[in-house]
Image (tube, coloured by chain):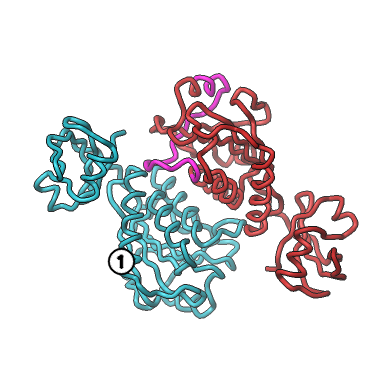
Chain colours: A cyan, B red
Amino acid sequence: MPQRYFIDPIDFEIKTISGNDAHHISKVMRMHINDEIIVCSNQECYRCHITDITKDVLFEIDEKLVKKEAFHATLIQGLPKGSKIDTVVKYATIFGVSNIIFVEMNRSISKEKNTDNKLKRLESIAKEAAELAHRFDVPKIEFIKRLKDINYQPFSYVLVADENEKTTHLNHVINHQNIKEHIAIIIGPEGGITDEERNFFKDQKAHFISLGDNILPTEIASLYALSYLSIKNIE
Amino acid sequence: MPQRYFIDPIDFEIKTISGNDAHHISKVMRMHINDEIIVCSNQECYRCHITDITKDVLFEIDEKLVKKEAFHATLIQGLPKGSKIDTVVKYATIFGVSNIIFVEMNRSISKEKNTDNKLKRLESIAKEAAELAHRFDVPKIEFIKRLKDINYQPFSYVLVADENEKTTHLNHVINHQNIKEHIAIIIGPEGGITDEERNFFKDQKAHFISLGDNILPTEIASLYALSYLSIKNIE
């Protein structure tokens, strides 16, 4: 598979790759005119070939790639400690998450500060992971201060991963009928969710689910749910 | 949940925790007599309380924990680069793998050397991850030099994750009827598997499967399959 690049719609309009991606093509990959690349923009990807390499890279489209219909899942992730936030973004992107919202929850030890700088770094991790995974889009990442500041209206289903829940599993809530709906997956920080948060989620008509018999660390817990959605989406 | 410790059957016989675990109890967790711990040995776990703390820790059993029947999956992992081997062990253990075999495959850049030292480190990562995940056992880890040195007889199903496979998915091979069988999951190294290896696996009557539309990096690809097996095992 040729290398994949996500570019702005405005650059796609003029068939031009600039900045870091242009540098990557010319200096890191040392590509030449006529070499093949995949260019993605606005949730579509195209097989292209390079027509010119200077500071910028120009390309022409050969073929639009057929997009498989993905599931639509937003991860609402209780802010984890330190570099685990990078792990969340990288792996959840690879496993097909649509959007990620980081939110300070009661047991979050980290606080939301310098979010502008963090967001920049996380967006670049997400872009790289999306290229690696051959996705058609890059997930949108947001920091939201409090659970109650999140708009839950867009979600048809709000799933809360809860260690206390032993009997309700993903497949009891999400099945063939509703797999195409917009699903929110809520994962608590280290230490899990509090009763106060449980009550808040109940008011949002959330479904409390178990992620299996093993206790999953916060930074990879979403992968369990995303794997299920991916397989159910194919079935 | 109290802290969990995996100990040798011979130590369990005399209800004694020694070495690093005893140090962890007395110095790191600063526990006292009568504090509760979970002690696991020989694939069983028990709620216990501490009866004495000196250099060793003595305990008495209060209750045997009820074990849920897990699935039985061996991960055959093409040797990955550098520290990714640690990621494989940590995360696959958390997601419930039974055994891990590292094998040099055609596209493995790392070679199998100093495996005794590596094995020691990996076993300690697996033990810690099993404690974290509240497992009843610690997966067995092995290094085997070549694919053809592996004994495939114990496996009822050999599944090969193959980027070239687009139509056969996990659920086409593993379902309610055969989820309790011993399943082998083969994940290639970075760069995937070669045609020579494909032919070898065909001779082993392996099933070639897709792990979804996204390309998963070698160190976390098994999590997709293990999540599916966990959910199917509950269903």
Q: Residue at x 60, y 37 (%)?
A: B178
B211 part of magenta stretch: yes
- Residue lying at the far bottom in this picture: please name it: A196
Number of marks in the rendered image = 1
Up-down: is B32 above or below B221?
A: below
Q: Which quarter of the rendering shows the C terminus of chain A? A: top left
Image side of residue B130 versus residue A69, left or right: right
| Residue at x 50%, y 68% (from the top left corner) | A189
| B51 up-or-down from B136: above or below | below
Label 1: how many residues lie within 10 Å, few (<14), some (14-19) or many (20+)?
few
Q: Judge whether residue B4 can be spotted in this image.
A: yes
Q: Is residue A22 above or below residue A166?
A: above
Q: Quadrant of residue B29?
A: bottom right
| Chain containing mark 1 | A
Residue type at mark 1: give it.
Pro
Residue under the image location 56 percent in, 50 percent down: B91
Percent from the top left, x then y, of residue A5? Answer: 25, 45
Residue B142 falls within the magenta-colored stretch: no
Spot occupied by residue B147 in the image (x, y as percentages of width and height): 59, 26
Percent x, y of residue B108: 50, 32
Residue B144, percent across and down? 64, 30
Residue B235 in view here: no
- Identify the element where label 1 is drawn: loop
Residue B72 higher or lower than A163, as above or below: above
* Residue sticking out furthest to the right: B14
Q: What are the residue bounds of the magenta stretch? A: B199-220
Q: Is residue B146 left or right of residue A173?
A: right
Towards the viewer: B147 or A17: A17
Task: Write down the residue under mark 1.
Answer: A154
